[in-house]
Each structure stands twice: as structure tokens, then as C-alpha cells.
Image (tube, coloured by chain):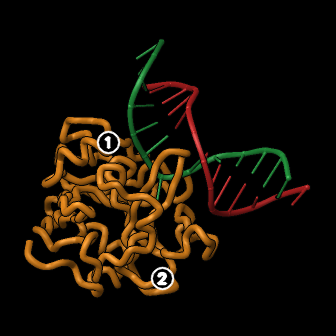
Chain colours: A orange, B green, C red
Amino acid sequence: MAGRLPRSFYARSALRVAPELLGRVLVRRLADGTRLAARLVETEAYLPDDPASHAFRGPTRRNEVMFGPPGRLYVYFTYGNHWMMNAVTGRAGEGTAVLLRAAEPLQGLEVMAGYRGRDHPRDLCSGPGKLAKAFGITGVQNGHDLVVGSDLYVLEGRPVTRSHVSRTTRVGVTLGAERRWRFVVTGDPFVSRARPSGA
DNA sequence: CGTTGGATTGGCT
DNA sequence: GCCAATCCAACGC
């Protein structure tokens, strides 16, 4: 898992990037040097002209990062409690991204448990709100560049082969729910418990 | 300026 | 399995 994913990786359709993010390793280095790492096992694509996407109605103050260059982190707050993180994809101006939904914790589990208020490894990153919380991600990290920063980035890891990727409908969206744009590592115990609509 | 409901979670029935 | 929590962005008047 040597290098990190380059800008060109993100600068493609979210439908390509989402499945190819599986098996990659999200890393955060905290101010005190603690290293948090987790292997992505569940992602979801949000495309341009996608009625379920925050970007559907054009740029606003909240979603402006989605319309910026690829390879940056789009973080938003919802349901009064939860932060969620996305990797911006495509080309600047398009407004497309991949939601990071779940991961297998690899490093810094004690710190993650502290942020989460939960101990069991399967409870640390098994959902989009949980994943952000386990990594201490809030609006502060909105717009962070995953390609050049040294404290929040994505390593190449070990990509998951196509035969081990399952594709389902998305979770929690109403409009465009029928689109099968959620990708998971088949049978992985660290995926979210969310119920996809339809699949 | 007021209203509505959400890319969820966790606790309770 | 079901439902309340809890805040704020987006939209309508």
C-alpha cells in the first residue's frame, strides 16, 4: 500500500471511482502524531444531473467544494448530528462525488473508539456518519485536498477485484433511489447495516 | 423570515 | 423493526 492515489484517479466518473475506492486505505494523522487508518469497504456515487445529489440544483455555499477540483474532501452535516465525507470526482464545475460509507479500521482503533463512544471494531466505521466520527472529521476538513496534504489522504492499498464487488441501490435517498450506485466489498463484515431500497 | 425534511444513528418496543 | 433526536440548508412567501 505504498503510494497515495493521484489526482488523475479522482478525475473520472464517480461511477468508476466509487468501486475502485474499495480496498483503498483512508489515513489521518492527528496533531499529536496518532495515525488513524481504515480500509474502505462501501462507497456510493453521486453523479452530475443526479436528483439525489446535493449538487443537483447548482452550486451553493454548502456544496461549493463539490464543484471544485477532484481529489478534495466534501464534508457536510445532516440529521442534526452527523458529518459525512465524500471524495470529489470528475472535472471542476461538474458537481460529482463519491460518499465514503464504511471501512474496516486498521490503525488507531482506541482513538476511534474514543471519538465514537463505542468499543467494538465493527461499530467504529460501519456507516457514513460513523466513519466521519471515528476519524474526527467535521466541517473543518471540508475542502481538504486528499492528494497533497500530509495529514488526511488515501493510500492505494489493495484494490478489490471486480468479482468481489457487489453493486446495489443507494441508501437513504428518495429521488433517484433506483440507481444502483452503491458499491460494497461482497460479504465484508465491516459494511454498514443500512438497507438499500429495492436490492 | 418561517417551514420542511434530510446521502443517519442508536435506543427502545 | 420502528422511531425520535437535533440542526441547518434550501426553498417558499
Q: Earlier in the sequence, mark 2 or mark 1?
A: 2
Q: Along the line of sight, which residue is nearer the eye, A134 or A172?
A: A134
Mark seen at residue A68: 2
Rendered image quadrant of residue A114: top left
Give the class, few, some or many, for how many residues have Cα within 10 Å of label 1's Cα (few <14, many ≥20). some
Q: Residue visible at 46% across and 74% down? A: A96
Question: Where B10 sits versus A55, above or below?
Answer: above
Chain under disc 1: A
Q: Residue visible at 21% across and 79% down? A: A5
Q: Amino acid at mark 2?
A: Gly
Residue bearing the label numbered 1: A116
Question: Where A172 sits versus A60, above or below?
Answer: above
Q: Along the line of sight, which residue is nearer the eye, A182 or C10?
A: C10
**For the residue labelled by badge 2, is the local secondary structure a helix, a strand or a loop?**
loop
Q: Amino acid at mark 1?
A: Arg
| Alpha carbons under labels 2 and 1: distance apart | 30 Å
Counting from the top left corner in percent of width and height, residue A53 is at: 52, 65
Question: Where A91 sits versus B10, above or below?
Answer: below
Q: Residue furthest front?
A: A32
Chain under disc 2: A
Horizontal placement of A22 versus A44: left or right?
A: left
Counting from the top left corner in percent of width and height, residue B7 is at: 47, 52
